[in-house]
């Protein structure tokens, strides 16, 4: 149960809150940039619908490669890795704007996604370890919602930026801003107390050897990693593809112009954003499992509506639901992934379940959507993915324990033998 009077945040926690929110802002910005620019990119780069799907899939490979960065946070520390990933994304985004062909664009965007997703994962670990249990859901929710704010800003800017002499390239040049912001904010950043405490104890006698690739799968947390990986996979196969490909559907099947489709997406983002900031607080009040039920059922309805309705009012309502639930499902899974593993394995668990396993859905599904769209159109392609949120929900309700309001040291032990967990994590 959540505490009736949550502990107030300290001055440092408030500054950290801002920093982590800024870091995740550009995750939403970059994701929406590709979704908004895909028709323009296909035209400029000479790609078919299927080719557009493959472009998205190749870029999303970077979200899997982020595994190799995220797992380093359990050895290098959270602070060092967060700084590295922000610099890496800034350079990659700028170079995306300089790309001269489909291959160079895909490669630089692949690197941008790799650094971005690693940055996002470390930000969630920071949030889990540095904020009180009774506020953890709210904090993770607001940080994730900042990505929605980034998507909104991008939606508003893209139509204007496309009219400039630089065209779509200017959208990626703006991605250089994180480095300037980080230069100001990073001075107040310090290592998380949980990691600092654990690492000082672990390094007291001698530095621990680097973790082997399969290390976490040799601990009692193996099954939990695999379950979370499958849930993340199903979530990425679903509603995210609606956001990515809906503009293509609107132009090809609904007779909307580029400006009309962009306006609908931007309006949905603006209307949905206030609710995304409430998702975390909802999870702290309702619990993770009941919150997942509400959000994932909503995701299914949003997917079906946005792919099926022709009336603009119904389309807008469905897109608003998509905006809320695409953030909401990530808040739910972020909370579960951060809370169900111990400090010494938390980043590795995130890297395995989200980046290495879960992002398979993010890599494979866009190509499949593109192939189906090439043959049957985007309506059929997007209607078909409505089943994935429901499958993810069944796994959550059937296999994951409730973690709401508990300290991380307690949630990591739920359903795990304490003695074997301690030995397996060594």
Image (tube, rainbow, N blue to C red):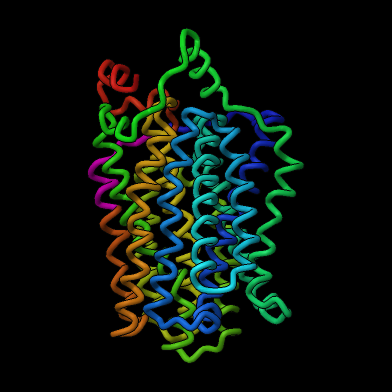
Q: Position of residue 88 (x, y in %)?
A: 60, 49
Relative to 110, say whether 346 is above or below. Answer: above
Q: Left or right: where does residue 273 sit relative to residue 389?
A: right
Residue at (37%, 81%) from the top-left corner? 378
Front residue of this view, candidates 130 and 74: 74
Q: Left or right: where does residue 134 sit relative to residue 418?
A: right
Magenta stretch holds residue 271: no
Residue at (31%, 56%) from the top-left corner? 234
Main secondary structure type of the part rendered in magenta: helix
Residue at (30%, 36%) from the top-left corner? 401
Q: Residue furthest bottom?
A: 255
Which quadrant holds the C terminus? Answer: top left
Q: Left or right: where does residue 185 sit relative to residue 98?
A: right
> Number of numbered discs present?
0
Magenta residues span 393-403
Front residue of this view, candidates 336 and 97: 97
Magenta stretch holds residue 397: yes
Q: Position of residue 286 (x, y in %)?
A: 42, 43
Relative to 294, say whether 385 is above or below. Answer: below
Q: Residue furthest right?
A: 184
Q: Position of residue 145 (x, y in %)?
A: 56, 53
* Quarter residue 389 falls in: bottom left
Residue at (65%, 31%) from the top-left corner? 9
Q: Position of residue 208 (x, y in %)?
A: 43, 18
Q: Residue furthest top?
A: 205
Which quadrant holds the N terminus? Answer: top left
């Amino acid at each position: 149960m959540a505490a009736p009077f949550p502990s107030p945040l300290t001055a440092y926690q408030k500054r950290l809150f801002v920093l982590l929110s800024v870091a995740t802002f550009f995750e939403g910005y970059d994701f929406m940039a590709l979704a908004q620019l895909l028709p323009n990119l296909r035209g400029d780069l000479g790609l078919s619908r299927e080719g557009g799907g493959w472009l998205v899939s190749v870029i999303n490979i970077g979200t899997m490669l982020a595994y190799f960065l995220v797992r380093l946070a359990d050895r290098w520390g959270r602070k060092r890795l967060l700084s590295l990933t922000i610099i890496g994304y800034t350079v990659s985004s700028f170079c995306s704007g300089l790309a001269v062909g489909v291959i160079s664009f895909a490669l630089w965007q692949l690197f941008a996604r790799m650094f971005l997703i690693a940055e996002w994962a470390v930000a969630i670990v920071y949030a889990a370890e540095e904020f009180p249990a009774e506020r953890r859901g709210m904090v993770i929710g607001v940080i994730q919602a900042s990505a929605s704010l980034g998507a909104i800003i991008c939606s508003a800017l893209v139509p204007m930026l496309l009219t400039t002499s630089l065209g779509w390239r200017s959208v990626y040049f703006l991605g250089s801003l994180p480095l300037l912001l980080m230069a100001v904010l990073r001075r107040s950043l310090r290592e998380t107390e949980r990691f600092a405490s654990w690492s000082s104890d672990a390094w007291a006698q001698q530095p621990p050897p680097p973790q082997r690739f399969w290390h976490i799968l040799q601990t009692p947390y193996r099954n939990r990693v695999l379950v979370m990986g499958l849930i993340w996979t199903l979530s990425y196969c679903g509603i995210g593809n609606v956001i990515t490909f809906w503009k293509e559907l609107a132009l090809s099947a609904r007779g909307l112009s580029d400006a009309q489709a962009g306006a609908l997406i931007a309006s949905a983002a603006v209307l949905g954003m206030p609710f995304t900031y409430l998702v975390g607080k909802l999870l702290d009040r309702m619990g993770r499992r009941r919150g997942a039920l509400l959000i994932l059922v909503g995701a299914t309805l949003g997917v079906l509506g946005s792919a099926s309705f022709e009336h603009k009012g119904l389309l807008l309502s469905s897109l608003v639901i998509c905006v809320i639930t695409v953030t909401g499902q990530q808040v739910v899974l972020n909370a579960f992934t951060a809370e169900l593993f111990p400090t010494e394995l938390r980043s590795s668990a995130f890297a395995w379940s989200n980046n290495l396993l879960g992002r398979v859905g993010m890599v494979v599904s866009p190509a499949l959507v593109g192939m189906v769209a090439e043959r049957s159109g985007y309506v059929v392609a997007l209607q078909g993915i409505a089943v994935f949120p429901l499958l993810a929900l069944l796994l959550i309700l059937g296999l994951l324990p409730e973690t709401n309001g508990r300290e991380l040291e307690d949630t990591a032990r739920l359903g795990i033998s304490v003695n074997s967990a301690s030995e397996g994590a060594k």
